[in-house]
Amino acid sequence: MSGGLLVAGTTSDAGKSVVTAGICRWLHRRGVKVAPFKAQNMSNNSAVVVGADGRGGELGRAQAMQAAACGVAPDLRFNPVLLKPGSDRSSQVVLLGEAIGNVTGGSYRSVREQLAGTAWAALDELRAEYDAVICEGAGSPTEINLRDGDFVNMGLARHAGLPAIVVGDIDRGGVFAAFHGTLALLSPEDQALVAGFVINKFRGDPGLLGPGLDMISRVTGRPVHGVLPFHLDVWLDAEDSLAYGRTLGRPGPPSGSEWLRVAVVRLPRISNATDAEALAAEPGVRVQLTIEPGDIADADLVVLPGSKSTVSDLEWLRETGLADAILRHAGAGKPLLGICGGFQMLAETIDDEVESGRGEVPGLGLLPVGITFGARKTLARPAGEGLGAPVRGYEIHHGFVSRGEPAPLLRHADGRPEGAVVGNVSGTHWHGAFESDEFRRRFLTEAARQAGRHGFAVAPGTRFAAVRERALDVLGDLVEEHLDTDALWRLIEEGPPPGLPFVPPGAPS
């Protein structure tokens, strides 16, 4: 096999990331040397890659997950352009892993040509090294206000001569109209590359879809390559949305007699909230993302996750009453954990001339440290120990502890302290620490003790790496069982089918 495919979508969160990962896992299991690719991602969920020179770089977490589906290590070329929103109007630009500055909607145009050139060069290199490259689009290919200069969706397909399939989320409704409208608003040249559709998240009897599948194929001249069922085990490494009030995963029954209730605050600029997923993989641990003070009051353990805008999100906590709820929770002796930006919010002071430009502002004052933001971002994959157990993690932050030396939560392998613990309040800059199974179990055991959940017991056999691997296999199974893999294989190997009909009205060329 030698080729590629673009997985586009009718909307954000239609399922492009998971369908791409599923196709990657299916190909990997067939012995194909396959790589994922997303020219430009907009997400505050990122992973860290450390090169042979010791320098770290960032790429979208979804592409790191897709790399695992391919059985390869993450490569910065898999996501050459990463935009990390810091506000509604500006984003940090990460180019081949390195932050190069900030852009607004207006200034983005001045760097778009550079970003496109870097992305296309990365794709060309990957296609020379791999049998197949499965590309994920961004948003919708018919964001017609952005088509001029697009290098992520049909602009990418046109550049590389890739066939495209369009994924639609039927759980939201209107999927057939979305398919037809997506195609009909593309130019003739773009339409010539769209080879078919995939329906995602279907609940019920697929036979009921028959008339709709026949009609959309008849009016567009393109087949539906399959219907993927809604599956409860597809929840890890969420990228686009973590809904308010949502319970993560499918928590199994507790090993002991009591559940442990965890509330993760859904900050406006939440970053790497995937830390909570390792907690949600534990039987008897119910993890809920929330913006409600009442959920904080009911929780045993509260987690303040990472943030791309620490000072702004801290201000939001105060405005919404969540800060008061968090202070009451900690004051009652219940466990409170801050991770990265959440750790910084727990400090006495935050001195930020980098992200917010606000200078020194008061933190929540629950940990006796001061935080200062530096211009250079820390990107690392540290290892060490915590609570007597080995721990690995990754770091992505501008802020650092500039004052105070409380007892550390973790220690680096060389003995350097990391984070802080004062009674029932703790914090760390390390993401991913709870993916270390023994450390997670010991932390949860102590949290349950502090919360008074004496009947809670961890399940000693839970391995988060195995949970994630099973999830990737589920995606591969769904592709094999529910998609026309022969048709996908032909598209990847042979390119767009000739003679695909034009669907009016189309967009100008």
Image (cartoon, rainbow, N blue to C red):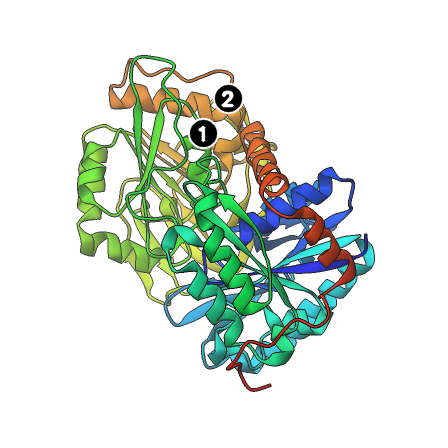
Crowd band around label 1 with a 10 angstrom C-alpha radius: few (<14), some (14–19), many (20+): many
- Compared with 24, 496 (above or below) is below
Q: Residue at x 52, y 58 (%)?
A: 214
Q: Which residue is mark 2?
A: 462
Residue 419: percent from the left, percent from the top? 44, 38
- Compared with 223, 171 (above or below) is above
Residue 484: percent from the left, percent from the top? 64, 48
Query: Could you give the CA–CA distance between mark 2 and mark 1, rounded to whole angstroms?
Result: 8 Å
Would residue 242 appear left or right of 132 to someone viewing this image? left
Q: Residue at x 49, y 78 (%)?
A: 144
Q: Quarter-wise, where is residue 76 in the image? A: bottom right
Do residues under tags 2 and 1 come within 8 Å of each other at their CB atoms? yes
Classify mark 2: helix, strand or loop. Answer: loop
**In the rendered view of the protein, which quadrant contains the C terminus?**
bottom right
Q: Which residue is mark 1?
A: 281
Residue 2 numbered mark, or none: none
Residue 14 visible in image: no
